[in-house]
Amino acid sequence: MVGVSVAVRARPTPPRVPALAVLAYHLVGYRRTWRAGVFSSFLLPVLTVAGFGFGVGAYIDQGVDGVRYLDWLVPGLLASTAVQVAIAESTWPVFGNFQWTKTYFAQSTAPLRVADILTGHLAFVLFRVLSASAAFLLVTALFGALVSPWAVTALPVVALLGLAVAAPTFAYTSAVSTDSWLAMLFRFAVIPMTLFAGVFFPVESLPVALRWLAYATPLWHGVDLCRAATLGVAPQWSVAGHLLYLGAWALAGWLLARAAFRRRLVI
């Protein structure tokens, strides 16, 4: 009598926190490519601080609202840097994971849910926003442009701001068919928002219609909170109102992105 042994292939055990496994994947990839993003996420904003803060600021004798222009400008650049890093990490990398490398499809065959894939990648975007913002704060502190010790509270603000723009951008990117739509997003949304959301000049100088469009953008709320933190003054809106508004953008964007990811990944 011949005994026959049958090997049973066990199903892979999912990690305890699956989204952390996705985050670890992106961190490993970033370890090999981080040098490519140093200029766009760090050196370019610093050069902007030097050019606008010391160059243009030298011609603004009274400053803005009684504050030296460099000190007034830095929190706006901090918030806009967070937005640009968040959107840059939420457009072509997300599109490529669907269309080119098919990374999301490979991850969906593992014991990972759609929410895990989305949340893990968003966590990596949050890491990129925080690391770039912390470096930016450090350099501007060396410039002497941080007036208040409350400036450190700008970091959780830019983290929430990053999620508020990254999550809707994930939803948008996962829904478009070609990367031409991503260039249009930068051209018709990111650039106008950066120019008119209070980064370089007060929105009160805009016509009323444009002013309310600026108020509707997440960037203006982040700029107002960051400016209050770095200058040690009260924001124009209540802190709770700003945080709730940004949180609503983040939550709505995550829900839309999860629905869009599910349409693409779940057969």
Image: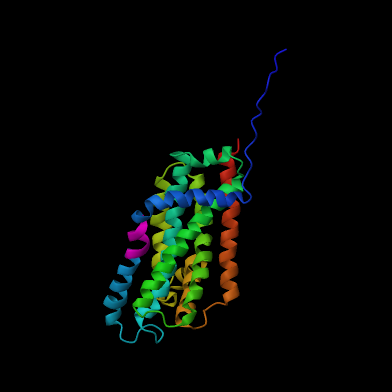
Q: Is residue 99 magenta?
A: no
Q: Which residues are magenta?
A: 37-43
Q: How is the image coloured?
A: rainbow
Location of residue 12 with respect to 129 vertically, above or below: above
Point out the residue furthest to the front here: 1
Q: Position of residue 166 (x, y in %)?
A: 50, 57
Please identify the dominant SS of the magenta region: helix
Is 99 in front, or is 125? 125
Residue occupying image coordinates x 41% and y 52%: 31
Q: Position of residue 191 (x, y in %)?
A: 39, 61
Is 120 in front, or is 180? 120
Is 224 in front, or is 159? 159
Q: Position of residue 223 (x, y in %)?
A: 46, 72
Answer yes or no: is residue 153 visible.
yes
Q: Position of residue 243 (x, y in %)?
A: 57, 70
Residue occupying image coordinates x 36% and y 56%: 37
Point out the residue furthest to the top here: 1
Location of residue 112 with respect to 196 vertically, above or below: above
Numbered label tally: 0
Is 107 in front, or is 184? 107
Q: From the image, which quarter does the N terminus lie in? A: top right
Answer yes or no: is residue 196 visible.
no
Question: Residue 83's image quarter?
Answer: bottom left
Residue occupying image coordinates x 51% and y 46%: 174
Q: From the image, which quarter does the C terminus lie in? A: top right
Residue occupying image coordinates x 38% and y 50%: 32
